[in-house]
Image: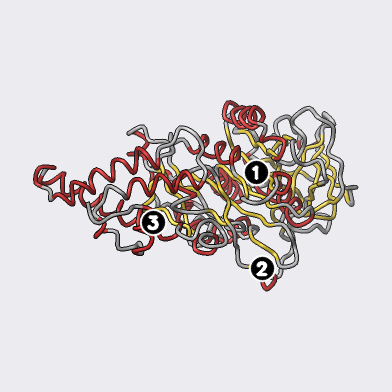
Amino acid sequence: MRPRLSLRHAAQRLEGPLLFLRRSVEVGYNEAVEVVGADGAARLGRVSAVDGEVIVVELLEAGSGLNLGETAVRFHGEPLHFGVGPGLLGRVFDGVGRPADGGAPLPVERRLRIDGLPLNPVARATPRDFIETGVSAIDLMNSLVRGQKLPLFSGGGLPHDRIAVAIARHARLRGAGTEDFAIVFAGIGVPHDTAEFFRRSLEESGALARSALFLNLAGDASTQRLLTPRFALTAAEYLAFVEGRHVLAILTDMTAYCEALREVAGARGEVPARKGFPGYMYSDLASLYERAGCVRGRPGTLTQLPILTMPSDDIGHPVPDLSGYITEGQIVLSRALDRAGVWPPIDVLPSLSRLMKDGTGRGYTDADHPALASQLYAAYARAGQARLLASVVGEDGLSDADRRYLDFGRRFERELIHQDAPRSLEDSMRCGWRLLAGLPRSELTRLSDAQIAAYLGGEAS
């Protein structure tokens, strides 16, 4: 990428990550730039705003040490691109796609815009097939479908990082070879110890060999956080739609991304919307989430599992609220289950996978999977009602049926949701049938007589 134009002595002021230049050349929005200080070091940036008099450049690296009078800015005449090639898997990159593992530079086969491949909506195919994560509360109750975007809603202090690593280590596409499935993992604004936990966990488990890891650290420039998911998804698109792999992209934490968006928007002087976030945050998030999917005529697929933390556990906060509108469901973590020692603390009642019906059942998982999940959900909801009633009248005041549901709820959390090791879908289903065996047969209205006879046997007990 060779410089097209160069400006010297045009810098007017530096405010946080934004460099303001006196405009004397024609440049475009999102154009890639290099900012060179008196020390000769080139800092990556991009044009974030242009008017008749001023060019605003977002610095993607620290601007400390820049002397405005000795700063030169080189414009490249094109948006930021990422050079990708066959050696992506097994590598660790920083937040803007530079190797961070001490290895050789990536052999570049193609240079792709980080804004995403142009995609005709008519070319999209309906997501199908099942991705097994090894987590029973997801696989059995809220299945992840190939090509879906399914966010995980967490809270401060909850073990979403541990869950993300567990899924990255054990996720697989049933019936496909390991060479056909890949993970792209992006850590956005993470502390050094968390970044090292991600890297070490994937490396020790051997999952790094089928993964591309992008790590944007908390000490990096906030503007870098706006690009990390874009570089990661560009790598995922190459693996999916060029190499033909089935890719699962895990992005954590999207709340850090949105807070960086708010910070940069404030530095630009933009009028804030709800809770100070910019009014265009919905469309900005959509430009990331909508990069998931299946494309007709392309063998690969791109599935997204974005993870976000809800400030004050508020599911109505703008970040989870807008994410819920764009994506196809949500997996919600429970602080109460976490305090009770349940891992992973997934609350199945507010969780939802809207595409589960398209990737489960006969031909995908098991013909009885949807009915089993529906009956377990209904029984656990009834257990919640029995738990609420017991808090008022005590367990002794409950009917026999309610006491059995109360026991079912405890066992559901301790035996099905809680797990010390990854489970196959078959193991999760066996656990579900075992739990339902403790309920009266007359209560199992979501199951057919044939299913009750085959898995539970006998009459009401």
**Real-space CA distance between mark 3 and mark 1, rounded to the nearest whole angstrom:** 57 Å
Q: Which residue is mark 3?
A: 454
Which of the two labelled residues, at mark 1 and mark 2, occupies the earlier sequence position?
2
Q: Residues within 10 Å of mark 2 (few under 14, many from 20)?
A: some
Nearest to viewer (mark 3 / mark 2): 3
Q: Which residue is mark 1?
A: 223
Picture mark count: 3
- Decide which of 309, 423 is in the foreground and name it: 423
Q: Which residue is mark 2?
A: 124
Discs 3, 2 touching: Cβ within 8 Å: no
Discs 3, 1 touching: Cβ within 8 Å: no
- Decide which of 22, 351 is in the foreground and name it: 351
Which x, y percent locates residue 226? 64, 47
Discs 1, 2 touching: Cβ within 8 Å: no
- Mark 1: secondary structure: helix
**Could you tell me if residue 55 is visible in this image?**
no
**Real-space CA distance between mark 3 and mark 2, rounded to the nearest whole angstrom:** 39 Å
Which of the two labelled residues, at mark 3 and mark 1, occupies the earlier sequence position?
1
- Residue drawn at x 49%, y 49% as measured from the top left: 139
- Residue drawn at x 79%, y 52% as measured from the top left: 243
In the depicted structure, whether residue 360 falls above or below residue 160:
below
- Amino acid bearing label 2: Arg
